[in-house]
Image: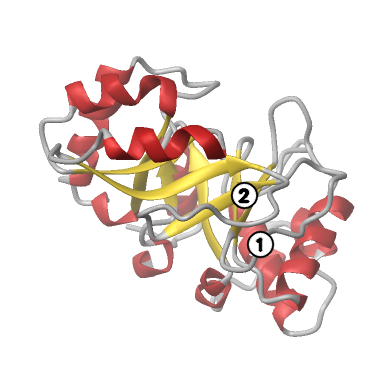
Amino acid sequence: MTSVFDGFFDDAAIFPPGNAPVEVAVKQHETRRAGPQGGLLGPLVCDTARLPAVLGAATEPLRLSLVGGVDETASALASTSGTRVEPVAVEVRGPVAALPDLPVRTIAVEMAWGSGFDVPAGAVLKLRCGGEYVPTPAELGAAIAHCVRHDQPFKLTAGLHSAVAHDGAHGFVNVMAAVVAAMHGDDPEPVLTAAPADLDLTSLAEARRLFRSIGTCDLDEPLAGLRELGLVA
């Protein structure tokens, strides 16, 4: 079932709580991309302030998701021309009235909890599941229900290192199963806190149509959780 998680883990190693130095994060990303689990790795996530350091550190072709304000991303993207870095996505903080015209495949708009889930057509909704605020199962369930109802793709970041929910932290496999439950007309909220034995692990691939990726500063812990569930080798 490795293909279920292809490109699912966006590499946010330079962000908290990992806070890896850019040079270390880039080298680690390149090594992992070349390794046996490289297909699971999404782009390296970087803010505009640290983009010059990433450009200087990249020794291999590197896919990038750039985080920044709407007004600063265009010039930052231009600086990647002729380098080893290929911007594939931009992540901006919402709300925004319309998507900027940027040369990337994906634009994610981050919405704060309590500010709604509406983003411009064509955008990916980005939500945080940890850090300063951890959404309740009811809040996350409502977001999932909204995305399924409106056919809205989304990504999650922060607080999702664990495959399975525990001690108040959300699990990304629970979220996938909850998305599938909502697609089948069921309430996603109870699935978010369900034990592994109560999760349908056979249909998780259905969730990827909407649940595009998670941002994580560490790949080892998510992979360990998937191995415990028998979902990756």
Q: Are marks 2 and 1 in contact (CB under 8 Å)?
A: yes
Which residue appears at 57% of the width and 56% of the height?
Answer: 99
Q: Is residue 223 visible?
A: no
Q: Is residue 65 left or right of residue 134?
A: left
Q: Is residue 121 shown above or below 127? A: below
Instruction: Pick out the residue farthest to the bottom.
Output: 184
Residue identifier under label 2? 109
Q: Nearer the viewer, mark 2 or mark 1?
A: 1
- At label 2, the amino acid type is Val
* Horizontal and vertical percent position of residue 207: 58, 71
* Horizontal and vertical percent position of residue 82: 13, 40
Which residue appears at 70% of the width and 41% of the height?
Answer: 129
Report helix, strand or loop for mark 2.
strand
Q: Is residue 23 left or right of residue 120?
A: left
Quarter of the figure with residue 46: top left
- Marking on residue 24: none
Which residue appears at 22% of the width and 27% of the height?
Answer: 55
Report helix, strand or loop for mark 1.
loop
Q: Is residue 56 shown above or below 109? A: above
Residue identifier under label 1? 120
Which residue appears at 76% of the width and 57% of the height?
Answer: 192
Quarter of the figure with residue 153: bottom right
- At label 1, the amino acid type is Pro
Reading the chain from its start, which is encountered first: label 2 or label 1?
2
* Horizontal and vertical percent position of residue 9: 43, 48
Q: Is residue 24 left or right of residue 93?
A: left
Report crowding for label 1: few under 14, some 14 to 19, many 20 or more residues within 10 A (C-alpha).
some
